[in-house]
Image: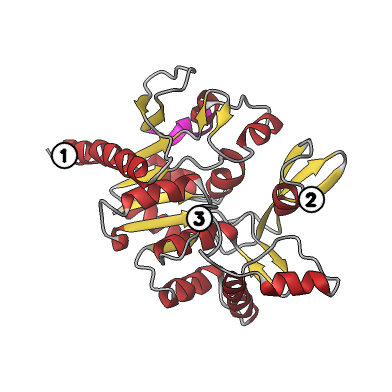
């Protein structure tokens, strides 16, 4: 079994490649939920939904979010009657968000609601939220604090970042399901998702880092030089007083990393890193990267069993 730590874009691309190598039920995905938000009576969990839609064969892989060929009639009509929303949701996507909100209001945990939705969407992979505590990533810009979704969707990432703040009512703890998924895996893969807003919220859940120290962990850098493959990772890393490159990413994860993979084009050398083509421009490239990573895992399994 392979366990992934995932955000909403880079790691799902890798998992799409992995689906050509192994059965979905052999994969467990621990997903960032610090970008979740409540609005219009529904509960948006963008990274969870991206992963669910991938394994349900519903994902719009042109945008890497939402459901393919979804319509936006509800969102358009809300805007017409004077209620524009912070995020434009597809109609079927909205149905998932409404159902999740109702389950949470009825007393289900996010883990339970995710299991129900995954089952109904016929996902064979095990998909786990990082915790059952509400955690919110906020951006401070010019003295104003805003939800990450407002920064990234509302402002399209075009405002300066003074600070990245994590808001939660209590220290988030990883669920037992999350910790067990790490312990039971043949390897844990931290995909090329944003280190600040996608992976660090998972690592900040109590118990995760300690569990990773006892596992074989492979990390794929999301950077090529000082530029991320996608998203605002560079600006977010600088807001954390870290250089926006693979070396800083490695430094963030070094306490539990066994193998660090950086792109063959990356001009920033990292001692001990393995160079692979990590630019997953299509499913064939994702499959090749997955094959190369799996060879590393299989070699490690053989070494342990010898």
* Image mark for residue 302: 1
Question: Any magenta on residue 256?
Answer: yes
Q: Position of residue 106 (x, y in %)?
A: 62, 82
Viewer-nearest of discs 2 and 1: 2
Q: Residue 110 at x, y = what percent?
A: 55, 69
> In front: 126, or 16?
16
How many other residues sit within 10 Å of disc 3, few (<14), some (14-19) or many (≥20)?
many
User: Does the residue at mark 1 contact the one at mark 3 (Cβ under 8 Å)?
Assistant: no
Q: Is residue 221 above or below residue 201?
A: above
- The reply to whether discs 2 and 1 touch (Cβ–Cβ < 8 Å) is no
Residue drawn at x 74%, y 47% as measured from the top left: 151
Front residue of 176 and 294: 294
Q: Which of marks 2 and 1 is nearer the N terminus?
A: 2
Relative to 3, residue 94 above or below: below
SS category of the residue bearing label 2: strand
Query: Residue drawn at (38%, 52%), measured in percent from left and top?
Result: 16
Q: Mark 3 points at which residue?
A: 31
Mark 1–mark 3 distance (CA, rounded to whole Å): 29 Å
Q: Mark 2 points at which residue?
A: 146
Measured from the top left, where is residue 266 in percent x and y?
A: 46, 22
Q: Which of marks 3 and 2 is nearer the N terminus?
A: 3
Residue 49 visible in the shown view: yes
Camera-nearest label, 1 or 3: 3
Q: Residue lying farthest left?
A: 306
The CA distance from mark 2 to mark 1 is: 48 Å
Quadrant including the N terminus: bottom left
């Amino acid at each position: 079994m392979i366990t992934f730590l995932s955000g909403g874009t880079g790691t799902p691309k890798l998992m799409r490649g992995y689906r050509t190598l192994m059965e979905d039920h052999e994969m467990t995905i621990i997903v960032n939920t610090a970008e979740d938000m409540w609005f219009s009576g529904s509960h948006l969990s963008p990274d969870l939904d991206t992963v669910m839609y991938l394994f349900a064969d519903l994902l719009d892989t042109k945008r890497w979010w939402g459901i393919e060929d979804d319509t936006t009639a509800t969102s358009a009509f809300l805007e017409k009657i004077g209620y524009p929303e912070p995020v434009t949701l597809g109609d079927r996507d909205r149905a998932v968000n409404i159902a999740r909100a109702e389950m949470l209001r009825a007393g289900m945990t996010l883990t339970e609601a995710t299991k129900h939705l995954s089952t109904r969407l016929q996902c064979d992979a095990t998909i786990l939220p990082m915790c059952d505590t509400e955690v919110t990533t906020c951006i401070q810009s010019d003295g104003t604090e805003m939800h990450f979704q407002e920064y990234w969707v509302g402002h399209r990432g075009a405002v300066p970042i003074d600070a990245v703040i994590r808001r939660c009512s209590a220290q988030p703890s990883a669920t037992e399901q999350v910790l067990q998924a790490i312990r039971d895996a043949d390897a844990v893969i931290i995909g090329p998702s944003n280190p600040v807003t996608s992976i660090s919220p998972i690592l900040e859940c109590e118990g995760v880092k300690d569990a990773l120290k006892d596992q074989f962990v492979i990390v794929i850098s999301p950077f090529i030089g000082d530029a991320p493959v996608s998203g605002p990772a560079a600006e977010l890393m600088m807001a954390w007083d870290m250089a926006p490159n693979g070396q800083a990413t490695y430094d963030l994860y070094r306490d539990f990393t066994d193998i660090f993979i950086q792109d063959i084009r990356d001009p920033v050398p990292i001692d001990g890193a393995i160079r692979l083509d990590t630019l997953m421009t299509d499913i064939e490239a994702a499959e090749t990267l997955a094959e190369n990573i799996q060879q590393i895992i299989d070699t490690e399994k053989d070494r342990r069993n010898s």
